[in-house]
Image (cartoon, rainbow, N blue to C red):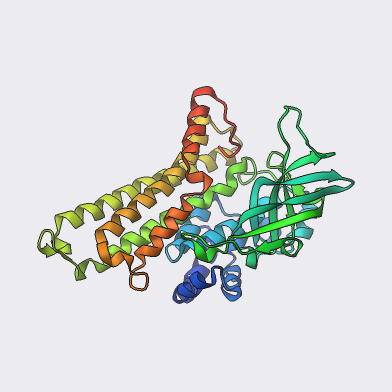
Amino acid sequence: MSQNKEYLKIFSALEEVLPHIEPRLNEIEQLRHLPADVAQSLKNTGVFAMNFPKSWGGAELNSMEQTQLIERIAQVDAAVAWCVMIGSDSGIYSGYLENSVAKKLFKSVNFITAGWIHPQGKAERVEGGYLVTGKWRFGSGISNSDLVSAGCFVYEHGKKALDENGQPIWRVMIAKPSDYLIADGWHTTGLQGSGSLDYSANELYVPSEHSFSFSEPYRKGPLHDSPEAILRNMSGVPLGMARAAIDYVRSIAPTKFDRTLSVPWLESSRVQTVIAGCEADLLAARSAVYSSLEQQWHTLETSQPLSEELRVATAVARFKAFQTSRDIIQQLYDLVGGASIYKQESPMDKWLRDVNTICQHAVAQQSILTASGELLLTSKSNNPFI
């Protein structure tokens, strides 16, 4: 565990808050979003300040510390961890805005930002800014957010604007939640408590200075010298879920009997093999995540360029964290058997639904391997987050 005082302060505060959140997980699942008081209790821990610079009063945690915090929250609930993971990007976004503008928008280092950064909208250039029109999904935590991001392609006179390389110009717009029309389309397989609602706008005026490009950071340092910083702590969600699932199955082992081998679970070679195999898989996936993050952070911290191999390492380690955690939870679900399907009696059902849902995120798709292989073989990649 890190000995960074800021990290330990937040970790300690989370340890006090999480036991009060755990009894409310059914409520969160039914509401399909975090209750306001739960979101506020998380704000009070300082976890949403982990990407803000110390000069602002933020925690400025490194990627490994951030991932550990998300991992700990995910051991309690994936949806809560997902909301914290998304909402804590505020500090990163602030570094892509001019400092005085950023401080006016992000009035507190505990601000929560929700939204979908990928260019699903249209930003028509007008004097002083943009008229933003579009519909975005996956607004995780938007019900409790202070600001909302919306990815757009830039248009001029009704036509998509191109940069000097002939590529469409992608900018992220920042506005208040009240500026958007929010719609509840979040009826999903899992991660129901994340409240990842849809939101839309029709010719919403956004000043130019309230928009940014990931290729133009104002702030320097490891959190802004590579745009994929917003993805680095994501692995904490699947890793935490897998850890919780293994711990749960081990906790019920003394009460279970293996009918196939006619022995208690504790003496069953079948159960022993599955449990040890899951531990081995999690150890490998977790080690890959943290070792690649540590190498990346050291490289960026010392102002060295990221090698192609290191860029790929963090991306594929993240990919494998998601895929491996799903495999672990599926194995344990099958091991527990019929009892897994009873929602009110076993957490296995929710873990399986949640892990399958998070594995639909772009970072867990085969396209990550394709882009990574392309970079390794051709030294080129169209994915800006690798």
Q: Position of residue 365 (x, y in %)?
A: 48, 42
Q: Position of residue 130 (x, y in %)?
A: 82, 48
In the shown orientation, is residue 287 left or right of residue 116?
left
Q: Residue at x 59, y 61 (%)?
A: 185
In the shown orientation, is residue 333 left or right of residue 309?
left
Residue located farthest toward the left when viewing the structure as drawn: 262
Residue 95 seen by the camera: yes
Q: Residue at x 11, y 59 (%)?
A: 261
Residue 89 seen by the camera: no
Q: Nearer the viewer, residue 261 or 386?
A: 261
Q: Quadrant of residue 112?
A: bottom right
Residue 49 vs 223, above or below: the answer is: below
Which quarter of the rendered picture does the C terminus lie within? top right
Number of marks in the rendered image? 0
Q: Residue at x 74, y 45 (%)?
A: 122
Residue located farthest toward the right when viewing the structure as drawn: 127
Q: Nearer the viewer, residue 224 or 142?
A: 142
Q: Residue at x 60, y 65 (%)?
A: 46
Q: Position of residue 348 (x, y in %)?
A: 35, 63
Which quarter of the rendered picture does the N terminus lie within? bottom left
Q: Nearer the viewer, residue 45 or 2?
A: 45
Q: Position of residue 372 (x, y in %)?
A: 50, 33
